[in-house]
Amino acid sequence: MTGEPPRAAPPALQPLYAVPDGFAPLYEEIADCPACDLARGRSRTVPGSGPAPCDLMFIGEGPGEREDELGLPFVGRSGQFLDELLVGIGRSRADVYVTNVVKCRPPGNRDPLPAEIEACGAFLGRQIAQVNPRVIATLGRFSMAPWFPGQRISQIHGRPIEAGGRTIVPMYHPAAALRDGSLRAVMKADFAQIPDLLRGNA
Ligand code: URA
């Protein structure tokens, strides 16, 4: 225990964007969530964007600074690269559902802690059920972990599995390609499989 008294979560800010159809109750619950310490540092919760149902869902790690300001996922530099990858497969943000493992920004963009991922897990489960995607692309090591426990992204990226009636395909996180330019082509090649996966050809 430190001597610091626990701070209450700040009141939820109103979303700056239209909440997708059918998501109002869940997004309100996320906005009021006090379940872990990330709630104390957030400006806005970042529940997710895109329509439901939707055949294609992306799961990232957690909001960064820009996402925390706007309440939308992947609106910073990683998001620009995600948009470029989507254009490459003929899709756009309007027709994919995008969310993160944790819905509040980890301070200083540190990795989310196991307890924070656990606290947010039920929200992610409900989003998957409601979006009901044919294909889930996980972005980075945190979102792939439930389907690929103990595995390394460098060894399994782009290799889909079937689970619970969906195709799950692990991808590098776009931020990894911003740090290491050689991963841009790798990510483009992994994304290029998505149209086939959506047609049921795993
Ligand atoms: N990185 C993520 O994992 N998610 C975001 O929303 C933004 C950056």
Image: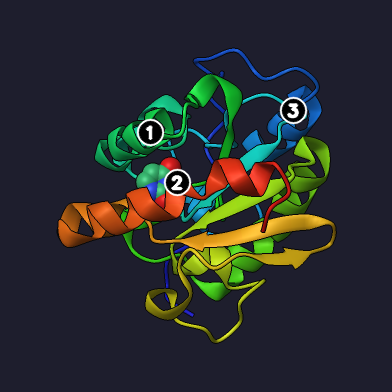
Q: Mark 1 points at which residue?
A: 88
Q: What residue type is labelled 2?
A: Ala
Pointer 1 and pointer 2: residues touching (CB < 8 Å)?
yes
SS at mark 2 in the image: helix
Q: Earlier in the sequence, mark 2 or mark 3?
A: 3
Along the line of sight, which residue is nearer the eye, 186 or 28?
Answer: 186
- The residue depicted at 32 percent of the width and 33 percent of the height is 84
- The residue depicted at 45 percent of the width and 46 percent of the height is 192
Disc 3 residue: CB within 8 Å of ligand 1: no
The image's mark for residue 52 is 3
Q: Position of residue 159 (x, y in %)?
A: 54, 68
Q: Where is residue 136 in the image (x, y as percent from the top left)?
A: 64, 51
Disc 1 residue: CB within 8 Å of ligand 1: no
Q: Closer to us: mark 2 or mark 3?
A: 2
Q: Which of marks 1 and 3 is nearer the N terminus?
A: 3
The image's mark for residue 53 is none
Q: Which of marks 1 and 2 is nearer the N terminus?
A: 1
SS at mark 1 in the image: helix
Q: Which amino acid does label 1 sit on?
A: Gly
The image's mark for residue 192 is 2
Along the line of sight, which residue is nearer the eye, 63 or 193?
Answer: 193
Q: Distance between the residues labelled 1 and 3?
A: 22 Å
Pointer 1 and pointer 3: residues touching (CB < 8 Å)?
no
Query: Dot 3: few (<14), some (14–19), or many (≥20) neighbours within 10 Å?
Result: many
